[in-house]
Amino acid sequence: MFNEIMVNPSGNNDGNNVPNTAEWVEIYNLCDEPVDVSCYALTDGDFSLTFPQGTIIQGNSYFVIGSSNSGTTVDLNWATCNCTTNTNSQVGILTNTGEQLILVNETGALINGIYWGSGQFPVNLLSLALPGCPSQEITFNAPGIFFETIPVASGEDCSISRLCDGEWAETCGNSATPGAVNGTELVVVDFDYPEGEICAGACLSFEDLSQGATGWEWTFFGASTLTSTVENPSGICYDSPGFYGVELQITSNCGPATIFYQNIIEVLPSAIPVISPAGTIVLCEDDGTVLSSTGTGNFQWFLNGSAIPGATSNEWTPLSDGSYTVTLTNGICETISDPVDVTVVSAESVVIEPASAVSICEGESVLLSLLDTYDSYQWLQNGIAINGAISPEYLCTDSGDYAVEVISGACSSASNAVTVSVVAIPEPLIAPQGPLEFCADNIGTLSTGTAFDSYQWYFNNSPIPASNGNSLSPQSGGNYFVEVTSDGCTGLSAETNVVINDVANPIIEPGEDVTTCSPSAILEAQSTGSIQWYYNGQAVPGETQATLNATQDGTYYFSAMIHPSCPKTSDQIEVSLNVPLELEVMASADTACNGEIVQITASGSYTEIIWNNSSTEDTLFVSSSGLYVATVSDNFCVAVDSAEVFFAEFPIAIAPPHFASPCTDLIQLSGTATGEVTWLMNNTIIAEGAEVTIPAPGRDTEYVLSATIGNCVATDTVRVGVDCTFIYAPAAFTPDGDGLNDEFRVIVSGVSSYKLRIFDRWGSVVFETEDPEAVWTGGVDEYYVADGIYVWRIDALNEQNLELLDKSKRTGTVLVIR
């Protein structure tokens, strides 16, 4: 707080003959601890001064601000600190007629303000920014409740300072010295209070901030507790809306001191919501009873003290037991209603047994009953009350949806709906309709035609195992019917009588067609029952015995029957009489080589065969020369045929071993062979006889020695290798005319085509020839090439026009050195 101020004392000015600046201001720290006032700003409305970073006022001590001629030691020189908005001699000049001093903190909040006379309001000034301290605008249109009025000094050399009771007094002459009046602790009256609005019914606490107080007298205007004498009163409640002030008077060693803050407590109106219906209520579950609240604003319903999610309107439908309250928020005020205790009587769980859909068959009934007991009952079919159906049970014989309404106490409940379906009795019909007669080899099928859910067939009133399909093939004669189910209902068909007649198993012998040179053939019937023979599809009169002598060509079979309704015919056979025997003997080869096998096969219309080597097989496999004769018969006729086979000696062919020969001479091929002997090259005969003389080949060649006796051929091969080509190119030469190694000569032998090219390092041809005898002397166009390395390429073919050199040997280098 401001503690003492010296305004316009006599004395020297700051040297510019302007009004005296020998003034100072004392600021007092009421706290026991040091206060950091860095970046605080002090202004009189004409100038401002910013406290530099690190400015500290010690506890229960003071801080003096002035100029160099203030007449006392100052803690901060406002003319030379470079922290003011005005640096000329006018800085800090205070007037005696009317002035003010304002102290704000680093955020611009008012710390203390004093004024004398009428002041010089309004104040609007921008403070100076220092390192670490931003500038701030200081604006006051008129003194507020936190400004103190002090007396105007009566003359020069007089300061205005606080006494120990906080009152202001004038001190003149030598007594006007900073700190002299305040040698003891000041008596200050002040208190702290909750700032902002409160709601009616709210209670506050106050804290005494006074200094030097020994007693307290509080006055709380508008509160339910008007006065208090405790240092820090609490529980001060305000029930009525309005603005109210607070006064604190203290007693101290310096006497009484009083402070009054007017209209610092703002009490807002708050209405308590009222729930309707109120008190304790009993509800039936889902009967739609609604709790509603009075008031306007934001609502929140609670159940047993916990907020109900989403219940934020003035109405709520309770669904469970408990204590319901509602809060009403209007602005900052929140009020809560009195509780309403709700008991919700649950709707009775009415369950019909059976609970699921029921199907009954025509003529049947189902008893619907309830699991629990109620006060009254009313059964309904398809939503319509059934007359007289008012008991816990109902015997149902018709289709429909059945439910029951019950009353228990004050609440009514409805059951689940149960669907009852009446299903018609199925009436299966067996097709074909009987009585039925089948042959044992062609038994028909009994079928219901219409599809049902399940089937069970019966034979002579006994169920047939595993007969669960819609059709059945009877296995024995007797009475058959079927039992079917459809939608859970069972029905029976009428009985059908089935007769199954035995069937013969006719077998004709022989079991294949008959071809014979005889004028007749005996056929035999193997079967039970009566027999009738047939010829070419017509019954043979009188032929009803087991055997038949067939005397004509044609088709024969017989019919046998055990029951007249079920005849059975045998297989048909073709009979051919007076047919000569057929025999053909074929050999796979007329001649063969010793060691080979020849197959001889007989075919024809015979029944028996014998070879002249006693074999009775149709096929012979022979390995020796001879005549092979087959004799066949069919018990009546005989036929003979033969085949002759010759086996020749296998020849010998032995070629000489592989060898190499020169390119320019003749060579001799000498082998060992029997039979007809030839030499072949590339499958072409080049000479006859085991020993021959032929020209030497130009390249590796294979010769084949072949020996033939009859169809027998033997061969052997000899490979003749050749080496008659030669190409050599020197690696360097010295064309210096000394007669030694003066030429580049390629030595060539055994070529039919030759080409030599020599290239310089840029790829230009410096020498070219197709003459194997030509030489290069190291020159081009009548001048010598430079010394160095040159590249040569040789393309050469042999007499067979084949490349003599592969790609890696076609090129090389030669060094020219002089």
Image: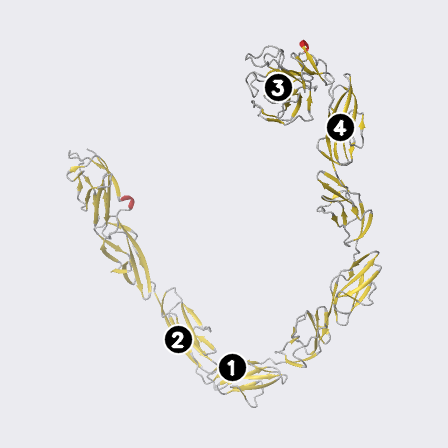
**Which of the 4 image quarters holds residue 717?**
bottom left
Q: Nearer the viewer, residue 158 or 657?
A: 158
Of helix, strand and loop, which one carries label 4? Answer: strand
Q: Position of residue 194 (x, y in %)?
A: 72, 30
* Contact flag, marks 3 and 4 (Cβ < 8 Å): no
3D distance between C-alphas at marks 2 and 1: 32 Å
Can you see residue 760?
yes
Q: Position of residue 17 (x, y in %)?
A: 55, 12
3D distance between C-alphas at marks 3 and 2: 148 Å
Q: Residue, x 68% and y 77% (percent of image)?
A: 429
3D distance between C-alphas at marks 3 and 1: 142 Å
Reading the image, the residue beneath label 4 is: 246
Q: Amino acid at mark 4?
A: Val
Q: Crowding near pointer 4: few (<14 within 10 Å), some, many (20+)?
A: many
Query: Which quadrant is home to the C terminus?
Result: top left
Of helix, strand and loop, which one carries label 3? Answer: loop
Q: Crowding near pointer 1: few (<14 within 10 Å), some, many (20+)?
A: some
Mark 3 or mark 2: whose residue is earlier in sequence? 3
Q: Amino acid at mark 1?
A: Ile
Instruction: Give the label on residue 55, or none.
Output: 3
Frontmost of labels 3 and 2 is: 3
Reading the image, the residue beneath label 1 is: 573
Instruction: Give the label on residue 642, or none.
Output: 2
Of helix, strand and loop, which one carries label 1? Answer: strand
3D distance between C-alphas at marks 4 and 1: 142 Å
Q: Nearer the viewer, residue 592 or 507?
A: 507
Frontmost of labels 2 and 1 is: 1
- Of all residues, the one furthest to the bottom in this rendering is 541
Mark 4 or mark 1: whose residue is earlier in sequence? 4
